[in-house]
Amino acid sequence: MKLEPKGYQADDPPMRYLLEVLEADRQRYADLRQVYAFANVDNDEALTRALWESKGVVPILHNVDADGSYGPLYRTILEWRTYAQDPTAWRREQLRQLFANDPAASTATVDRVTELLQHGDASLLLSELNPPAAWLSLLRQQRIFDSGTANPGAWIAARLNDPDMIRAAAAHPTFDERTTWYIERALDQKRDELGPVRARAWEIMLSAKKLQADIDNGFSWYRQAPRIRAGEVGYEVRRLVTNLLRPRLRVGRAFQFYDESAEPQSEETAIESLHSFMRLDFEPSERSNFHEIVETWPRDERSLVRNRPA
């Protein structure tokens, strides 16, 4: 990488001559590297960028101070140096300031946090900085945890006794194996300080949000269906059908019938219950189709899965 000295503009004669010679040499020397130039943005950023790019140069645009000095450029370069020395430490300090803000107050703050957490140290930083629970649902909406590189497990475990984190985790769709491990370990260590209601809330979530068995049963059904049509309805098949038709416990965000911020309750007067933390429902398996199972089952065995007449 080459950095051209600042001060000249793309159309200045010395710079134009240098770049034209360099462009001609590119046709003879294939190993010439990309050229970059620090370029001051005067009035028209698009025009400044276009002038440099027309010369085959990638411009690094910057502003100047009111007196024409290059203070913003120097500060940016110093910030780059700090980042290059320890990227994780640099992101940690950036996130520390951002997490101190109300996440609902600014979409720009959420976008910046999302950008900083798209690296391999996201799980570590969430665990160390331990931001408020309100960030969990926002980061999930930003798909921070979808790739698997960022995991909220250690962060959730650090706030196991936080009522807001219990409510936020209840709204989280699933717990993967790593998240489950962190929560189970913390639950064993902190059970006495949690109290019976909060401990039970985490136990229910751990039970309800492990959906791998449900997925496996769905795949097993499609593998076993041809055998069932052929009349093979032994113990393993009946157990599979039983598991598919068994209602599943679903945990979600608790319903709120009033504005909690408008009617705050102190921790001493508030009465905790499971329903104050989460909504509990029983639903059919997402991967079961009752009618398909009934139609697939052999005629002489259909009574095993069909309601008997009263």
Image: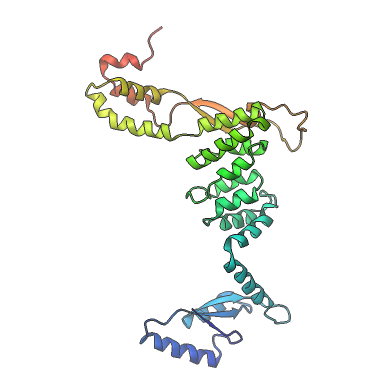
**Residue 192 occupies which quadrant of the picture?**
top right
Q: Residue furthest front?
A: 189
Q: Residue at x 61, y 86 (%)?
A: 7
Nearest the eye: 21 or 259: 21
- Left or right of 112, for residue 300: left
Nearest the eye: 271 or 89: 89
Tell me where residue 61 appears, x and y as whole percent. Answer: 58, 75
Q: Is residue 171 visible?
A: no
Q: Residue furthest top?
A: 310
Q: Quadrant of the C terminus?
A: top left
Tell me where residue 125 appears, x and y as whole percent. Answer: 60, 53
Tell me where residue 80 appears, x and y as whole percent. Answer: 60, 70
Tell me where residue 162 appears, x and y as whole percent. Answer: 67, 38
Q: Residue at x 43, y 23 (%)?
A: 246
Q: Is residue 9 visible?
A: yes
- Left or right of 67, for residue 232: left
